[in-house]
Amino acid sequence: MDYYSDCSPINYSGDQAGRFYCIWKVDQVVVLNIGEFYEKPTVTSSFPDMAILEYQPFRGIKVQETFFVYSSSIALVNLQIKNIDRINHNVELYPVLELGEDSLLIKDYDELHNGYITHHYESKYRLISSLYKNAPYPGNCRDYFTSNFTPYSYGGYYKGLEQFYITIKTDFYAANRNDSLNLKKEGRVNFIALHGKFSLKPNEEINVRYFRGWQDQKEDLQRLIDEIEKLKTEPLQKYVDANVMLFSRIPRIKFKTQDEKLVYFGAFNLARGSMYPPAEKTTHNFYVFSRQPLWGWGHGHQVLHESLSMLAYAYLDPQSAQGSQYVYIEQQRDDGLIAYRHGPRGLQDYPHFSKVLNKDMSTTSAPFFNWINLEIYKVSKDKKFLQDAYQSGVKYVNWLIENRDLDKDGTFEWGPYGIIENVRDWYNAVFQISAERYLDVDKEDISDELECVDLTLMMIKEMRSLSSIANELGLKIESTEWKNKADETANLVNERMWDDSSKFYYSINKENHSFNFMTRDLRRMEIIGFLALWAEAAPKDRAEHLIKHLLNPEKFWRKYGVPTLSADDPWYSPYVDYCCKWNGPVWLLWDYMVFDGLKKYRYNKVADELANKMMLAVTTQLKKNHNFWESYSPDNEVLNCPPNYIWDAIMARVLIEKYHK
């Protein structure tokens, strides 16, 4: 939704499906763009599927506009229009559906239901990651554009809005003056428009609604028409009430600023908007990384590190958060594997050749499973979920112990497809061979040849989480056993992975436990060193050294948060010029883990300062471009990476922990 650009109408756009909007004409005065409005739009309410705005396009004409995404096939705009003036006003509306570049093919105009039928094509190509060729993403699409009023006229046009302005303005003195649109019923156009005429007396109020329907051309058009026909008279209040009820569950917070409040609600909207109902091979709701843009990798379904967004989402809808975790539980392999991806397509484990085993090995994800389950339970208090999660979690951790510690020395290595398994995909100073990733994926990544401090700390966190879950379930002996395993692993981290000369934690060579791999010095300070606080693995004196590094502005204490790589490293870059970079950009979930670790060690003031940096990163972008982002620059404000990424929902959790004691 763009309600803020002065040179455009209020408009609603999709990734490749164009945009739709309404042009106003009041008493023959055309109001084309937001910049011409008498009173500019203000968003009064925003929900995952709905936004409510108020404005005056012309003095005396008060409008409440509700944008509602009813389904993946239908969106509507409801206009409650009132004449608050002392005189009569004639109001003409021109709802428009626009794709541009002659890409709309008019097939017909449905006189019975007052709807335009058009076709358009949507490519599966994407800049970041194209949609899967064999996945059921329609390319040949159908549009149905209609309204709840009988149009005075309708038309299709191949030129831009400036030319359309001339068309609807008309020349008052022209001999052949005509206020009708061109009634076009076939051919290629840039946009189509409906035309409604209304006359309002003082204090008179009308309701106008227009609809954009979308479907695969193989689908039944009549079913779409019938569904929209019902919505033409359907009261929207019940949908508003359902959203209010949904948000009534979240903690009430006395925010210090309005910005914090907007981020709080926006973060929950972000998570909810990425959730889908059960489909295909899962009986539970699931999420995608981002609905905007629609990109292939982001629609490959759930990955455990993305599921950290459930730490926040659980406060909005704990049952739905549990359902997302059940996707993993129901698809878990018999041997305990939770694979890299799970969802409607089932388990996706991306087998890669292991030189150690001399055979293919399945790929898992960064193991946050038990920590997520524990945190969801703290909100839901659902013992049945906790019991199911514990059984699944024990199997998973045992699989990791068996398959990610192949030399059985107590610390852990990533699998052979480490470059996705360890989450830190590109431009990783330790795991990546070349600074610019010149080699292919398998040759570039060395994380399966190291004892990895990040994975080992994650395993400690998983064991501690299992200990807490077992204790909650009354399994005292198992709780103690998991705690002891966590403590034993923490001792190994401190024995092997702490470098006393630089006072930091690093990954080590698997063969000799040194800080060198061939000609490489592995002592490159990354954000993962601070996970020793999050996993409660660092002794108090070492924690103090970590905090000194953290608070050093030449290393990690940057304007917009803690970068993934120390700023004094030669590979450091503050530029977010693509997705998935780990040589400097700020990833909010990893900063949250630092925030969580700081609180565990009672560095509460530092934690609050970090929360403020994260908030500054988010609010700066929301004010500039109205997007959350996959990652943020620690130093700069221009970002080129996927927008509206589900895991930025963690900001709601940050605010809850900051304020809701």
Image: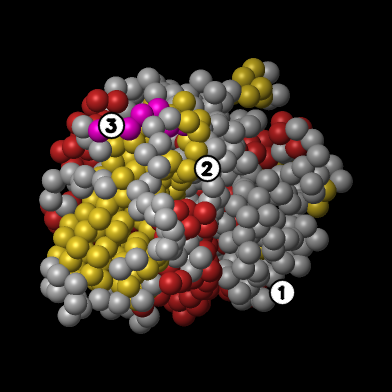
Q: Residue furthest right?
A: 519
Give the mark, 3 or 2, whose residue is nearer the N terminus.
3
Which element is circle 2 on?
loop
Q: Which residue sits at x=54%, y=23%?
A: 133
Q: Amino acid at mark 2?
A: Tyr
User: Image point 52% across, 54% down: which residue?
Assistant: 163
Q: Which residue is mark 3?
A: 110
Residue identifier under label 2:
158
Q: Is residue 618 above or below residue 1?
A: below
| Earlier residue among tags 1 and 3 | 3
Q: Which residues are magenta?
A: 105-111
Q: Identity of the amino acid at label 1?
A: Glu
| 635 and 506: which is toward the camera | 635
Secondary element at tag 3? strand
Q: Is residue 404 left or right of residue 172?
A: right
Instruction: Please state the horizontal and vertical placement of residue 39, each as a whole percent of the image.
Output: 35, 76
At which x and y percent is residue 194? 33, 46
Who's the residue at 14% across and 65% down the image? 205
Closer to the camera, 76 or 592? 76
105, 227: nearer the viewer = 105
Amino acid type for the residue under numbered disc 3: Asp
Viewed as shown, does residue 63 lie left or right of 630?
Answer: left
Mark 1 to mark 3: distance in Å?
65 Å
For the point 74% across and 44% down, the residue is: 432
Question: From the image, which quarter does the C terminus lie in?
Answer: bottom left
Q: Quick one: label 2 or label 1, which is nearer the N terminus?
A: 2
Q: Is residue 122 visible?
A: yes
Q: Which mark is residue 554?
A: 1
Dot 1: within a 10 Å radius of its alpha carbon, few (fewer than 14), some, or many (20 or more) residues? Answer: few
Question: Which quadrant, please, contains the N terminus?
Answer: bottom left
| Dots 1, 3 in contact, CB < 8 A | no
Q: Nearer the viewer, residue 293 or 448?
A: 293
